[in-house]
Image (spheres, rainbow, N blue to C red):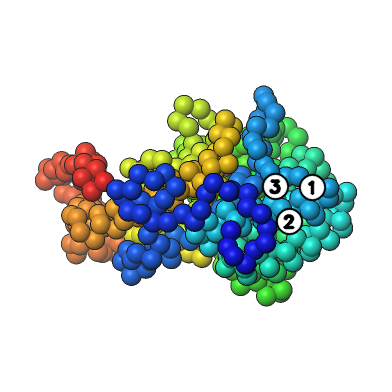
Amino acid sequence: MTAQSNQSAYFKNVGKIKFEGKDSDNPLAYRYYDKDAKVGDKTLEDHMKFAVAYWHSFCGDGGDPFGHPTRPMPWNIGNSAEDRAKQKMDAAFEFISKLGLKYYCFHDIDLIDEGENINTFGKRLDFITDYALEKQAEFDVKVLWGTANLFSHPRYMNGAATNPDFQVVAHAGAQVKNAIDATIKLGGENYVFWGGREGYMSLLNTNMKKELDHMAQFLHMAKDYARKNGFTGTFFIEPKPAEPTKHQYDYDAATVLGFLREYDLMDDFKLNLEVNHATLALHTFEHELQVAANSNALGSIDANRGDYQNGWDTDQFPVNLYELTQAMMIILDSGGIQGGGINFDAKIRRNSTDLEDLFYAHIGGIDLFARALIIAHQILTTSEYKSLLSNRYQSWETSAGLDYEAGKLSLEDLANITGDGSHLKATSGRQEYIENLINRYI
Ligand code: XLS
Ligand code: NI
Ligand code: NI
């Protein structure tokens, strides 16, 4: 803890995590994340804007459908919701500042328990956000994004903005209004919508078109309210194909972009892409990044990884350098993340029960991102990679190719140009050659 704070430390065995370089064998040090080091024209810290996810790190207790909580959470005691919320926040800010990070992300219900109704919850949010403002100032920590949890409470079992019952939609609206107020009050840079229950289990009881129209209406109302109240940040939609519903409306990046265009939301919304959600949709993460970047909508990232042997959102911390390097190549080449950052939407395993495990997990993830970014930058700026890629499309630089791209050719023209087709030759895609190139830089 810093000298200013009079709270007792929760992570007593851990001090401030420092950069010690790649030869360090200290498990509680950064080996690659030297936050002030420059990659290209930006520091590592500015490239990545790492955030800690309040829910996994300070609320998740290790319980699963087969077993009880396992996790020691010394902050989770106290007589009142207010006491518990303050202690949790003390632990969170101690953790974030010891990691040397600048951001966190939250759902409304992560900050404090809801209580008996939406009015109680509103008052409690006012209380805990007052405290959060003090902590943010003390530790120089900011909100990357806020959101409302519209999926845990039983009232949302049939959906929130897409609920068949208008009264539930109205309740969701009240909750989002409060969550937007909280985000604005805390200076949040972005606001996220992840549609946990926005989708369906069976089409037999679902009017899909009506639900999609309602969801779009809801997003417009949320955006209008936030703008009216001075919010200048970006709204993000976080795609996920399934879980908890069988068919999530925000299936993947391409689906969400189609939705945003259909309902005229592209000016205010971008995408928050999560690694494990991409792989659940049977895409690579870099595919999702590229789809978003194509539409100038690569807003933010939820960092984690899935498990290739099962089909769940396991939300593990990232460990795969080759895969992450490919992702960072897309991010760098498309001009970077727009407005958001890299939020560790990841949880330690149920049997990781030392308080320090949360540090190891984040240090590993942060170092991996730093390393992947440095390598990706080298590949893009010093290797033959970019020219290999552009050479593959060289034929488009001919006058016929340029005419095609400018829309000046017809199918008859193509038939004339190709003649009898006898001049076509096989051109290798050289995939293995390029795969080896990436590995050389790693
Ligand atoms: C769940 C989502 C969730 C969002 C925020 O799978 O990843 O954690 O990021 O509601
Ligand atoms: Ni997420
Ligand atoms: Ni997820």
Q: Dot 2 lies on which element?
A: helix
CA gap, disc 3 and disc 2: 9 Å
Residue, disc 1: 78
Depicted 332 relative to depicted 305: above or below: below
**x, y percentage for residue 409?**
28, 60
The residue type indicated by label 2 comes to Lys
Residue, disc 3: 75
Who is closer to the viewer here, 57 or 266? 57
The residue type indicated by label 3 comes to Trp
Q: Residues within 10 Å of mark 2 (few under 14, many from 20)?
A: many
Q: Residues within 10 Å of mark 3 (few under 14, many from 20)?
A: some
Is mark 1 in CB contact (under 8 Å) with mark 2? Answer: yes
Residue at point 74%, 66% (across, down): 130
Is mark 3 in CB contact (under 8 Å) with mark 2? Answer: no
Residue, disc 2: 86
Is residue 341 rendered to the left or right of residue 72? left
Q: Dot 1 lies on which element?
A: loop
Depicted 243 relative to depicted 413: above or below: above
